[in-house]
Amino acid sequence: MVPLGYYLILAAGLFAVGALGAILRRNALIVLMSLELMLNAANLTLVAFARAHHDMRGHVLAFLVIAVAAAEAAVGLAIVVGVFRTRKTVAVDEINEMKF
Amino acid sequence: MHEIGYLHLIPLLPLLGAAINLILGKRLPRPVVHFVACGVVFAAATLALNAVFGDLYPLWKAGRAGVPAVSQTVYTWLHAGDFTLNLRLVVDPLAGVMILVVTIVGFFIHVYSMGYMAHEPDYPRFFGYLNLFTGSMLILVLGDSLPVMFVGWEGVGLCSYLLIGFWYQKDHNAFCGRKAFIVNRIGDFGFLLGMFLCFVTADTLSLAELRDKADLFRTVAWLGMPIAFWVGLLLFVGACGKSAQLPLYVWLPDAMAGPTPVSALIHAATMVTAGVYLVARMNFIYILSPAVMAVVALVGAVTALYAATMGFAQNDFKKVLAYSTISQLGFMFAAVGVGAFSAGIFHLYTHAFFKACLFLCAGSVMHAMGDRGDIREMGGLRRRTPITHWTFLLSTIAIAGIVPWSGFFSKGAILAGAFGAENPAFHAVGMVVWVLLLAAALCTAFYMFRLYYLVFSGECRADEHTKAHLHESPPAMTIPLMVLAGGAVVGGLIGITMVPRIDLVSRWLAPVFGTGPGAAGAHHLSLGTELGLEALALVIAGAGIGIAWRLYHNGYSDLVKALVLSLRWAHKVVFNKYYVDELYDLLLVRPLRGLAVLCHRVLDAFVIDLVIVNGSAWAVDFLGRGAKRLQSGDVQRYLVAILVGVAGIVFFASRPSASFTAPRQARVGAPWQADASPLLRSGRELTFAWDFDGKGKFEALGARPAPHTFAKPGKHRVTLKVCDRRFGSSACRETVQKVEVTP
């Protein structure tokens, strides 16, 4: 059986990749994908702890996160498509009009 | 004490009338307005008569021990801890005299106002205020405790302010109203302090209980004087404000800016006598301190003479009467000050009639003259306004003190009281007061007849237009004049002091006024002495009238002009009212106004407006301009901020709190116990590392280590490092405590 720590290290790695991607990449689609990575890193820790502690609540929460992530992806992609239609770009650093 | 159920209606009915006229008055037709206003006062007068003659008189007649009184506890007003304050109304012989004066004189002045104010557009407001005043005055008179009296006291002050400034569109009137209110506030402050002192001394504010505990006021002393002195002095400050005595009289002459019925009702007959009533009401305290009695008597007597001399050179009809009122109030204070309480109240009662009548005559004359009150333009009105002339003459004789008019008896009682006064604190006070009052009586007779001759005899000095319009007033005005003049003529017959058996006033009031070191009446004077005193007073009054006749019986005589010229300097001082208003202006008003301007410029305009109000807005603006740069619109920066914030929260939340209890001092070789075990209750998985000598070497000894012994004396730093095992070495916190180790 794989020890808990391995899962957690993997999840931490995935989260770090996702966080860096979300912070550093300019393409809105890649940022969305990075968000998915972070969510799935969280899912992985949930499932890993659930398995280690024999507690089904972790699995249930992971399903909830997947469902929310699907909705978020749908809304996020729709926004990206909408932005692209009006501005012909999906670079997040160029979409910065929401300020003072 | 006899309980009756309708006392509360006596003040309530006028208050109800005020509510109707002030709230609905504008929509009511005029006849309804004055019917309501006069009707409620008439009803109150009926109830007052019933209370006094129906219920109080039998009790008085029975003559049991104590003060005969009927009362009603309306409800409990305040209840806090041991302290209970009831809204309780009491009619005893003293309050009985007052409610009769207030309701009966008040009723006739209400009736007079129907005629006098007939052309006034703001008719309901006037009657509303007048009713409100009557109700407040009745509360003041009937109240059985100082706070209830104070409610009435403030109520009448408010109405006085509202009515002086009734024609507030004129700046001057509004100013006079404010002046009256502010000067009264100074007096009210004294009243309040006196009330507090009563409460501190006797733990009660009810008059009946204060009377029972009066001994306390003699035995407890402060600054070498019994508390009675201080209470009396403070309440007298209040009385000075309300009753226009030196040095707080300055508002009353200006109060003449109000409509004339107001001057008659409030500023002559009733409200201004409230101070005299207060002193008489609190007589059981005053008589305990001869010193304060002497103060009251001297202030009263000096005011009586001082104000009377100011009447010499005034040219405004109502101003002369105003100074006369101040002077007569001085007589009353002198009376209560020498212990002749019933003489003071007697004069209050006779004064209410003749002074109300004089003021109403003034109103009638001004009505005829087209609202002008300058006596230099009058003269010869005898023929044009006969009823006003006769009633004025009768009242003038009364105030001058000619037998058998009412003023003769009441003034005689006061003079006899002063002559026979014995004051252990200041033996000569009776004589001093007597001489001053005698001089004041001479002046009174002189200036009142000067007024009479200048207005009613000689040739009319008005212009042709005014002369053509001279007319007698309508019956609504003349009937009250005749009734009040009748009172002024015969009202004194109920108090013939020379013959104690028919001196009803003294006998009626006797149960209320106690005896004590300060209260020595004129009872021991022999009949011969009294008759001699009365004759002297009569001669004095006759002399005053004679001088007035010589100088003014045919308008301003040449002798007057010569006198004014030769005494130019004195005339100027008196004409300018001794420059007291100017003195107050210089000493009080200007410095206070300067202070106010300073406060306005520095505190208000600079500190509050500029620094606090604008400053806070400016600071918010400044911070906002800085903080808006954080909102860059770049979503990835926001993400960084979120990540950093979450990391910070996790870091700080993972660190446990650290603290331990231990003695601040220890001895070398003795065990010293440190204890951090309360931290174990936090539910964390904690490790405890201790460093007892500050060398940085930690030992894991648990939350409650074994007692430590220090090897060396001096100051030691004990450090505890607490870590949460679940988060590794990053989640630690340290705490340090200094220990003083003695050998």
Image (cartoon, coloured by chain):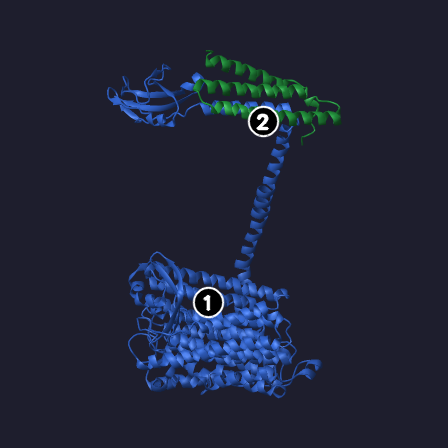
Chain colours: A green, B blue
Q: Position of residue B544 (x, y in %)?
A: 50, 82
**Dividing the picture into quarters, in which one does residue B9 lie?**
bottom left
Say which element carries label 2.
helix
Q: Nearer the viewer, residue B45 or B94?
A: B45
Q: Nearer the viewer, residue B120 or B86?
A: B86
Q: What residue is rendered at 46% in x and 18% in y?
A: A51
Any part of residue B291 in sight: yes
Q: Nearer the viewer, mark 2 or mark 1?
A: 2
Which numbered circle lies on residue B561?
A: none
**Chain containing mark 2:** A
Q: Position of residue B333 (x, y in %)?
A: 42, 72
Q: Quadrant of the C terminus of chain A?
A: top right
Any part of residue B436 in sight: no
Q: What residue is rendered at 28% in x and 62% in y?
A: B219
- Name the outermost residue toward the left: B670
Q: Nearer the viewer, residue B715 or A86?
A: A86
Q: Position of residue B594 (x, y in %)?
A: 56, 53
How far apart marks 2 and 1 lie (CA) works out to: 74 Å
Categorize mark 1 by other alpha carbons within 10 Å: few (<14), some (14-19), many (20+): many
Residue, disc 1: B152
Q: Position of residue B447 (x, y in %)?
A: 53, 79
Residue, disc 2: A68
